[in-house]
Amino acid sequence: MKHLRQLEDQSVYILREAYKHFNHLAMLWSMGKDSTVLLWLARKAFFGHVPFPLLHVDTSYKIPAMIEYRDRIAREWRLNLVVGQNKEALAAGMNHTLGRDVCCTALKTNAMKNLVEEKGYTGIILGVRADEDSTRAKERYFSPRDKHGDWDFRDQPPELWDQFKTTFPPGTHIRIHPLLDWTEINIWEYIKHENIPFMDLYLDRGDGTRYRSLGCAPCTMPIKSTAKTVDEIIVELRKSTVAERAGRAQDAGRGMEMLRKKGYM
Amino acid sequence: MSNHMTQHDQTKPQESLNIVIVGHVDHGKSTLVGRLYADTGSLPEGKLEKVQAICRQQGKEFEYAFLFDAFLEEQEQGITIDTARTFFIWNGRQYIIIDAPGHKEFLKNMISGAARAEAALLLIDALEGVREQSKKHGYLLSLLGVTQFAVVVNKMDLVGYRQDVFDGIEKEYREFLGQFRAVPQQMIPVSAKMGDNIATRSTHMNWYQGPTVLETLALFKKEQVRSEQPLRFPLQDVYKFDARRILAGRITAGRLKVGDQLVFSPSNKTAVVQSIEGFNVDPPPSEAQAGQSVGITLDEQIFVERGEIASHRDSVPLVSTAVRVNLFWLGRRPLEKGRKYVLRLATREVACEVAVIHRIIDTADLAQLQESQSVARNQVAELTLRVKSPLAFDLSSSFESTGRFVLVDEYDISGGGIITELVHDEQEGLREEARQREYAWLTGDVRPEDRALQYGHRAAIVLFTGSAQTGKTFLARRVEALLVADSRHAYLLEGENLLQGLDADLSAADPSFASERVRRYGEVARLLIDTGLIVVSTSKTFGINYQRMAEMIRTLVQPAPVIAVHMSRAGEEPPPNTDLHFAGPQDFDAAARQIIEELKKRGVLIQPSGTKSNIQYSI
């Protein structure tokens, strides 16, 4: 599994650069397969330690099993977990029926922006991958966000060899993307190789369906699948030509470009 | 879309290769990528249909390029703005295809894409021929270290698939590449739009017998030679999360093993690798090689910092304060002499400025000599750079990672380049003396950190510079007294005293009198520092040459912390590297306290008990 080692080496290098350069650093953890691999890579990079807080943006609409998994792993791996929530929007009744992009922006993007502002984080590590959707394919490993958290994709900084953008004007922050070069199959190959604990929502538990991508319960649909093990998932993905996020409602049309420009992950 | 090519579905990739697609704007890069994916059945289901639907909606003809030009604006203008990364698997190998923009306005995005690539496809439009960006991109590939590439002559359908057109472009472009010794692996005539020679052999060009684009990708080699080179291990960070003190970094060349003796440059500290650490790795590795991010422990707790390059003793990197480079500039404002930049090489960051702009390289006509006082955005130039403190590096002709650098202007990476020559500086002889001395230095069982814990401080030197009658000696004596009163071990090293004994054999008539005196002074300071003292030194005895003398002393006491204090009359510029500058009449007590504060800030003085120890040996 030489290619996995190469991916790991690059991600570890990026994580260590982030840790060295950012005094106020945090990692976003959604408990999904990608950000859990990211968390595992942090333990690789820092020899079993996770020297920064993990942020979970809780929309309150997550599948309950996800919260149980979160709390168990946080306890076992001695994580510093910080949960953020847009309580105002929830109190005002925000939900997906008011419009998916409105809901995502309020409960995810804005909740994260508030958390970043409140805690003063200047570096946020995220598990986005270039193969997820075409706007993420254009991301940098170190990607600046302006004072409003917006992404100026028209004018991204150069990224040369292993030199990243680690200096930035006050009031702005940097999104760090160590998993950019990983594909969905790579994620599962690595989970298997390292034996990383993951949620069984990703497996067929007897009803012929499984989740391929996890998000909020109302906006995430399981796919038809009989994959009961990681090996079976990998075989299934090798044959599949269906997009990974096909079960994620917010991706429809130009949704992702608009959401991400406004600061969505 | 051809459905018979689905063999990639079952193949398990053993390696992955980064390929960048470059060339002049509108020569068909995104179309080539779109076609490559479509013809190999690598598009996700529904992707083609989704983009076709958007085209219908906007009332325009579908183009393969739209598959990867993701931003609305890119599709509206029909150009790629930023590099996209896409993936496909073919014959047991995963390819990451980096589609770089060709418009000259987005050169920095092209460079970001190409800097990540292990191989490249360079596109030339058969109808338009070799254009400005075709040349620039070809030259930059070479500058960026991408030596594996193929030239793809696209839009052959528009020239009637004629061999003479292809031959003409091949001749012209090979001649251009030859000037900087770049040799393409293939020249391939294709039509990306019609699918000729992309994934399947064209029936329109029987005169071409070479490989298709897809076959050419398979011929690109995964580079492996770096691990056969001498070791280069730039130190990224030092961790102390638990009982282990781990030196972390990525090996950029060669390999290291447990038991190897390492030399760190430029400090010349040496130690032996005790272990290679890992998480969830059983058994722990005993060896590591180029490309790997690792962590090691050493047999001795030497003081080394991020930025130093570890190597074996028989092949150390070069060290100097000046280098000759080829650089491309991407900054918003021009690169200028006299402005301060930060140079980053591997993990090292050091202040730098442009000493000489030798010429601007015109990539359209390489023979052209163009003199200039500044380097504008998107220009390539030959320069000499001067850095503030000694830099360990290699020539890019021998080492890739440690032979290249970027320049940071304010907050932004604004340029990058490769080092072509070492420029000799006057410290070279002393630096070699210091290096040989460090190698041969014998130590007892007491380690520097043991002394530091006993004494309550690390060893350091406070170096006073300035012209006569500014109160240097007065202040130096005040600092020594203040430190000793605070139970620290400090000593005022007075140069005049050396003349009475150690230097008594030197004759003032000898031309080397001055430099030999400084050399001896520096070696004495080095010895006192090794005893764990804080040496307080004035340059009074060296007169007006204080600036040069201070540099020599720095070289000899390296890597001990130097706190440089400059005293001047009002309106005078302090020398480079000054930490504290006192101009005009002084409150000497306040100045002395300020120096003590600086010693605390730099981690030399251990803070009084109650606060966390800030001594840096164990960090």
Image (cartoon, coloured by chain):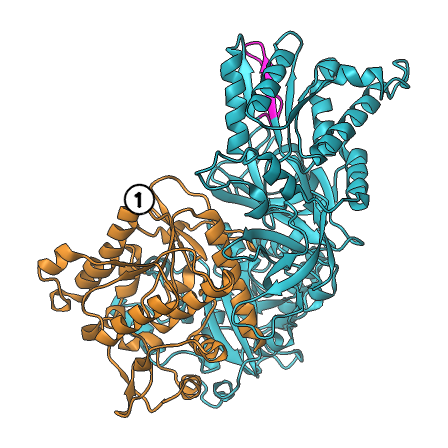
Instruction: Identify the image quadrant of residue B523.
Output: top right
Q: Position of residue A133 (x, y in %)?
A: 36, 68
Q: Assess whether residue B574 is covered by the magenta stretch.
A: yes
Q: x, y percentage for residue B563?
A: 60, 28
Residue appearing at x 74%, y 14% in the figure: B541
Q: Magenta includes B233?
A: no
Q: Residue at x 44, y 39 (%)?
A: B611
Parent chain of label 1? A
Residue B69 in view here: no
Task: Assess disc 1: are there few (<14), some (14-19) or many (≥20) residues with their C-alpha within 10 Å of its C-alpha.
Answer: few
Q: Which chain is cyan?
A: B
Q: Residue at x 54, y 25 (%)?
A: B486
Q: Which residue is mark 1?
A: A147
Q: Quadrant of the N terminus of chain B?
A: bottom left
Chain A drawn colour: orange
Name the amino acid, label 1: Lys
Counting from the top left corner in percent of width and height, residue B504 is at 88, 17
Q: Is residue B283 above or below residue B27?
A: below
Comparing B432 with B145, the one in front is B432
In the image, which residues are magenta?
B564-578
B579 lies above or below B125: above
* Side of A259 relative to B200 (left or right): left
Q: Which residue is painted at 76% across and 50% down in the image?
A: B316
